[in-house]
Amino acid sequence: MSETNYPYGDGGSQSCPGGGYPGQESGPNGYGGTPPASSPSEGPFGSVPPGPASGPSLGSAAPPTSPSSAAPAPWAVWGPSASAAPSGEPGTQATSGAQGTQALSAAQVGAALTKVGIGNPLPTFAAGALAYVVALGASLLVIVSAVVSVLTLDTGELTGGAAVPTDGATSPSSGGGWRGIVGLVGIPFQLVSLASFGSYDVDLSLGFLGSATMSWRGLPLLITVAMVATAFFAARLIQRRWGGNGALGALLWSAISGLAAAIVAVIATRITAFAVEDDSLGMSLSMHSAGVDMFVGTWVLIGLPLFLGHVAGGEKPAWWPVVADLAAAPRLALVHALAFAVPVGALMVVGGAIAMVVEGDGQSLPPLVLALPIWGLTGLALLPGLGMLIVPMHLNAQGGVENFGIERTDEFLWFFDLPWYAWIPMVLIALLMPAVVSLLWHRDREIDTGNILALVVSWAALPLAYFGCSVVLLAVVRASVQVQMGMMGDLGVTIGLALWMPLVAFFIGLVVEVLARFGAPFVDRFVPGMLVNWFRRSARARRADGTPGTGETPPGRAPAAPFFPGA
């Protein structure tokens, strides 16, 4: 056998000192030869005879020994503490070794998952659950706002003087009364479903008189925004504070968290559906918003913000500056929309309130103000479309509208159809705002002119972001009602922004890019830093630190694995 098969060399070689075990010499005093017998030592009671040898020499035949009493190999000290068991219990040794192997395997699996970016999923799951709970809280605010605004209407009695029927068909003691109570309790779940691109369907059956169905589709944006914002900022905080997940882990756990929330939402929405049945009259009423559309919508509106939040809070790789404009451009589009809509919306509300008071219609003002959680964000979202000046609102009413007392129409509402105190500020702010946001886009921007990919991204980022954000805006502000009433025919009413808005937004983004390159450099020196430095704060911090990452490692904790490979 070669020498490398012995941990400490060849035990039988005389040319290697200490050939048997370390710290011993071969030869007369080592294990290579028979040690001499020591002379009897003198004591107070005479000579002490020498004791038996402590073990056989390597040159003699060793007596047979049991496996449990055999001396361990030199490398056995690194095993999983098998020698800690009593020498006479081989089962204990096997159990201890198996436990050590299992612990080692778990550690290896955890290290392998961490290496590919898959960390602890519990914080991401908690963030998804929190987003849905916050959406339920926002739905309660919408309900309270609706009730309070109705109570403030100047219409005499709330029910118009008619008594509310309390017969056996709707009383809690009847067979179907508990379904009505469950339906009332489940209104928040129905609203969250409606805010997740669901449709609220009403099915009414009147026996031999026929049936009627109605479907309402429109997002209560307060609930939608609350859910999306909670998921995004919670995931970003988790990634910055604890890290642990890379791109693969963030994608996996975000998708699972959104899927779990969607499953819970569709089950809760279906269970809490409002249903009333009266067998004596042959009448049944069912109202709910559970469906495939709300399932997919909930999954996307929670899972996608969770993933984007992880990306925003994760460490950035060295190549991130090449594509950084793709991440910053949607933020600029959002800032542009809010910077236009908020002042214009405030002026319209104040001007409309003054006009209502002057015209003697002031009693209608408190209900409108109290109902702001219901219509406020939707009205605010419509303004950026009108602020493009060539994008109108589109109202379409078709079907048997005459039977319902509605005029058939297919018309557009332009900005100049608004009152003068609304459209004049709208035009002025719409023309000024591209120049203002171009200053934000220009400050602290760096473009690698030697990289062709960076040049292409720098030109394409803003137009593509404005186009994509306008598509999202088209989807969230669209509202529609579909009614089918048997012999009375059907009715369809749709209201939203014109479908060519994304194309207009694309060119507005291109205009902002041109102004940022060729106009903003001449004005940038006169703009106070406090007005524009906040937009690229994280990029400026990365350049100051000399590192591509944005996350900070808390004291006392080792840096987490990079979010992107190569970070």
Image (cartoon, helix red, strand yellow):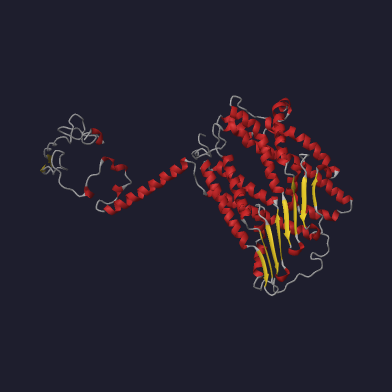
Q: Is residue 98 left or right of residue 137?
A: left
Foreground residue, 139 or 504?
504
Foreground residue, 509 or 347?
509
**x then y, percent, for residue 238:** 56, 44
Q: Is residue 417 left or right of residue 212?
A: right
**Residue 212 found in image quarter:** bottom right
Q: Residue at x 81, y 36 (%)?
A: 428
Q: Inspect this view and state whether residue 335 appears.
A: yes
**Residue 526 found in image quarter:** top right
Q: Inspect this view and state whether residue 245 appears.
A: no
Quadrant position of the N terminus in the picture: top left
Q: Is residue 72 left or right of residue 238?
A: left
Count of labels in the image = 0
Q: Residue at x 30, y 48 (%)?
A: 82
**Residue 108 found in image quarter:** top left
**x then y, percent, for residue 151:** 78, 60
**x then y, percent, for residue 373:** 73, 52
Which residue appears farthest toward the right when viewing the image? 359
**x then y, percent, for residue 433:** 75, 35
Foreground residue, 555 or 200?
200
